[in-house]
Image: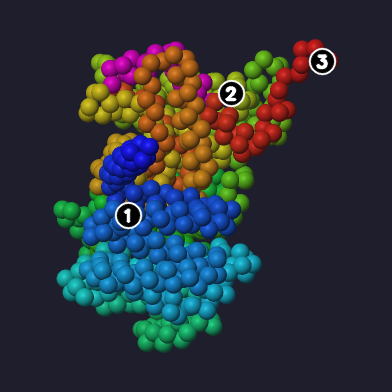
Amino acid sequence: MRNLGIKNKAIILLFTLLFCGAEIFWSSISVAVTPRDQYYKAEACYRNLRNNAQAKKYRDNWMRCIEKFQSVHQLDPSGPWAAAGLYMSGELFRELAKYSGKKSDLNEALDIYKRIAKRFPNSRYRKKAERAIYAIASNDTAIKASAGVEHQEKASSTSATDAARDNYYSAEACYNELRNNSQRMKYRHHWLRCIEKFHDVYRHDPSGPWAAAGLYMTGKLYHELYKWSKNQSDLEAARDIFDQIVAEFPDSRYKLKASGILASLPDKKETELITENEDPTQETEITGTIVSSPTKGWATVESLRYWSNPNYTRVVIDADQETSFYHHLLKKDPSINKPRRLYVDLGNSRLAKNIEKIIPIHDNLLINARAGQHTTDSVRVVVDIKSFKTYKIFSLKDPFRIVIDVWGSNSRKAAPRQAPIQIPGKGTELPPSALAKQLALGVSRIVIDPGHGGKDYGAPGYLKGVHEKDVVLKIAKRLAKKIRAELNTEVILTRNGDKFLTLEERTAFANTQNADLFISIHTNSSRDRRAYGIETYFLNLATDDEAIRVAAMENATSTKNISDLQTILYDLMQHAKIEESTRLAGYVQMSIIDHLKKKRWARIKDKGVKQAPFYVLLGAEMPSILIETAFISNPRECKRLINPKYQDRLCESIIMGIKKYIRETTPTAFLESRPTSRTGG
């Protein structure tokens, strides 16, 4: 019996060893995930938490994201992602302290920052950590007091203040780097990059504690730039900024600083060359001669375009090549009969000879857009403003153009008048607004965007003569017809025929039509003919190389340009319906995969919901998605894409996804549209 007991113990010990070995084996497999991948997973966790006010109330949600960031460091403690993961875990502990009011959370953050400063002396996160240590030491009592009800009331302002503070530190680092490099100081675009960063501090939180500091540094850098450039516009830009500080921040210490510099400036001269009383087509004279033709490498400003509705206007400046630019908002000046105006200066630029220099707009927001040769080497485009709530300016490449989006205070409330809709099977017509009210859909107008068109053929198909532009137009028309029939909703296509549209024009069209949903239809393509599957995208930072590749292909640009675009994407997200777009993309992708499989289409691959910076989705004010319906480069999927039955099933599944999205956002959406019982009166 004793021997039997020993044997049993031995067997138990053996199984224990085998189990532990298996656990070690599987844990080693799980470690195969790279620090980079883990960082993006942690970032996604934090983003979801940040966007969910309810989730932020529970500590375990914070700890889950913190552990994900810490595992980035644990996977490779001396690798390139280690400091980043550690720093973000400190940031989350620091933010958690504001909610919990616990000193221990703040101490955890402090310990992490100290570890970074000690272990990563050559990392850029060392300086960030040191600044955080200083901020905690300076604001310890304020952080403790911010817990509870007081914090809930001030949560949004705290978030804006934190963002403004981080932007200020980033701008300060840019400025320090510039000051320590005399070679860089010779080039204007380096100055403008730092100036823009300081100006962002003010724009992110105009009434916050960092706003005056950001504005002051913006003016200071312009003043310093003037000493290098001798360009009068730089001096006037500095003057405008300092005037703004005096007017908007009378109780700030920066008012005294700004007033002191203003007193030292020479008498003000009218330096803006484009005014209502001048002819903007007149070229600037330099020492009595007309400016000569641009030398090689200079950009030519070729045209101005715009799209408008009562509460949104998009203006686009087209140039033949990339160049640096700066924008500034000028206040109204009644003394010279000038409205408030926004100007964009393009460096190393000349106007094209045949450009239309004055574009009348005359909507609720803008009066017109004007272009003129501002200096020997710069073009100025001025937008005269009636009123606005906010604006965004960004650039796109291949070809280079600058996009100006202006929103009014009642954005998306005033839609252009549309023709009545004929309800299928009925003998009556109802306007879109009546339908929306009747069905309580919350979605009364959908814009469908068939990708490419005209001279832009899109991706070539595996089969000869098949092109993406033709395939997606057929799918879009089928989808529009089915939506009208099944949802009784107004549907507008960005193009009904083989017409070329720029990417920014498609988004502007959806905005000016006050669409409730924007759906862009595309087909995927790959050099590897074996690649296949379906995926749905929404606008955000790209999380993997494949997403960057797809975005570059659809944007008709390089992957490098996509990476560059991501640096400005955060500032463009203010009006993007990211959360809603994510849900819409999820429902549509799930419905497509499930429905096609149920209809017995073989080898349907779910490539999932992804995010990437697509030009066509930039600035969209409504939930927006881009569907890669299949790989046109794959032999099997190319044949399916031109098959009417497949197109029908695909469209049915997209509508199922839209219905699920509507039901989630408006649970009673389809109740009133149900048919009456056959046995009832």
Mark 3 or mark 1, earlier in chain: 1
Where residue 71 appears, x then y in whole percent?
Answer: 34, 54
Q: Residue 455, percent across and down?
A: 30, 29
Q: Amino acid at mark 3?
A: Gly
Q: In the depicted view, which residue is nearer to us: 426 or 87? A: 87
Foreground label between 3 and 1 = 1
Q: Are marks 1 and 2 in contact (CB under 8 Å)?
A: no
Q: Residue at x 35, y 63 (%)?
A: 87
Residue marked by disc 2: 484
Q: Residue 398, percent across and down?
A: 27, 43
Quickly name the residue at label 1.
72
Q: Quick one: quadrant of the C terminus?
A: top right
Q: Quadrant of residue 118?
A: bottom left
**Above or below, 564 relative to 106:** above
Q: State the SS at label 2.
A: helix
What is the secondary structure assignment of the residue under circle 1? helix
Q: Which mark is residue 680?
A: 3
Per the rendered image, the range of residues in magenta is 634-655
User: What residue do we see at 15% from left, 53% from top?
Assistant: 296
